[in-house]
Image: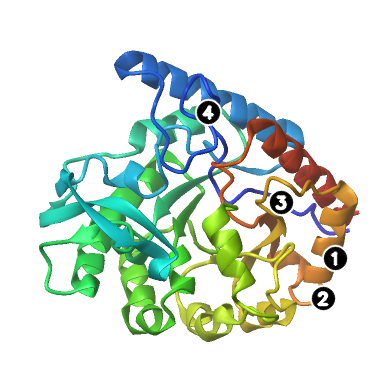
Amino acid sequence: MTQKLLATTAGSLPKPQWLAEPEKLWPKWNLHEDALWEGQKKAAKTWIKRQEQAGLDIISDGEQFRIHFVHGFLQNILGINWDKKTPMGIRNNRYTVEVPTVVESVQRPGSIHAREAEFLRNNTKKKIKFTLPGPMTICDTIANDCYRTRSQMAYAFASILNEEAKELEKIGVDVIQFDEPAFNSFTKETLEWGIDALEKAVEGLECTTAVHICYGYGIRENINWKKSLGENWNQYQNIFPALNKSSLNQVSLEFAGSKVPPELMRLLPDKELMVGVITVVANKLETPEEVKKNILLSLKYVDYERLIPCSNCGMAPLPEKIVLDKIKALGKGTALASK
Ligand code: ZN
């Protein structure tokens, strides 16, 4: 028999309510300064243990140290004015938020996530994954009042992401995953410069590299958007062939409970696939049997050695209890399918 399948999550997990406002995409911290750092470590440690106990093999910090998957990275980047809020319809106008504004050339003053990655490395013996926002998704979550074009801004971010990723790799991070949900909203731009900017971000890395492309968190705006996409969600069809040619090692995609045709997985014959085998909606709790079914269905299109059972997306905005049950089902279902 081959090795057991290695399960993981897309990255983010809910923050406990003593740490931050629950079930929000942009929550407020409930602790400050040193107490915040201590609280974040405590919450991360709890999720590390829970992932291990659930039987997952590639462990994240649950993004307990960042307020939001994009703005957590941007917080200490120079060149951004956080008081200059610009209303922006993000992910192709799916929802409008007030975003900070790039007003000068962006620069990385030093480590952004190093001590968080060190904490994760020191608290598990399993493989670890660290997530960073991808250049195109950053540019879709911040306003541009500096660069001539959005792609120029993306390349500027790609270069500082690359510096950061190289530092994370030195700490012993096994997988660096770039989150690019924007790839599903802007096919033309993804092919013109999005994947190329991502290549800049992974340049020279020797650890495993991954890109996560989804249909978004399980929040109302996304659920409504998905209803408008019809019977076949074919967005991946346009970008997978280009991604298969890229230097990225893994692609994370949405599958469970979606209308993504599973045969699209065949467009990535040279990549490892993190297939979403659990949904990220609060009203659906998968059983291990259902997870197993999703894995077995995926195995019709992906070789066993290339399949990594995963969640469809991050689970930050979901209730903590539900996510705990979901990762247990993910672990159990993976064990069942591995037999
Ligand atoms: Zn996602």
How far apart are labels 3 and 2 at the CA level?
A: 18 Å
Q: Which mark is residue 1?
A: none
Which quarter of the image is occupied by the C terminus? bottom right
In percent of width and height, residue 327 lies at 72, 41
Is residue 166 visible in this depiction of the protein?
Answer: no
Q: Is residue 209 above or below residue 76?
A: below
Ranked by sequence position, the earlier of labels 1 and 4 is 4
How far apart are labels 4 and 2 at the CA level?
A: 35 Å
Q: 197 left or right of 222? A: left
Mark 2 and mark 1 residues within 8 Å of each other at the beta carbon: yes
Q: Quadrant of residue 2?
A: bottom right
Residue annotated with mark 1 = 296
Task: Tell me which amino acid carries mark 4.
Answer: Ala
The crowd level at tag 2 (other Cα within 10 Å; few <14, some 14-19, many 20+) is few
Task: Tell me which amino acid carries mark 1.
Answer: Leu
How far apart are labels 4 and 3 at the CA level?
A: 21 Å
Q: Which mark is residue 44?
A: 4
Residue annotated with mark 3 = 6
Task: Tell me which amino acid carries mark 2.
Answer: Lys
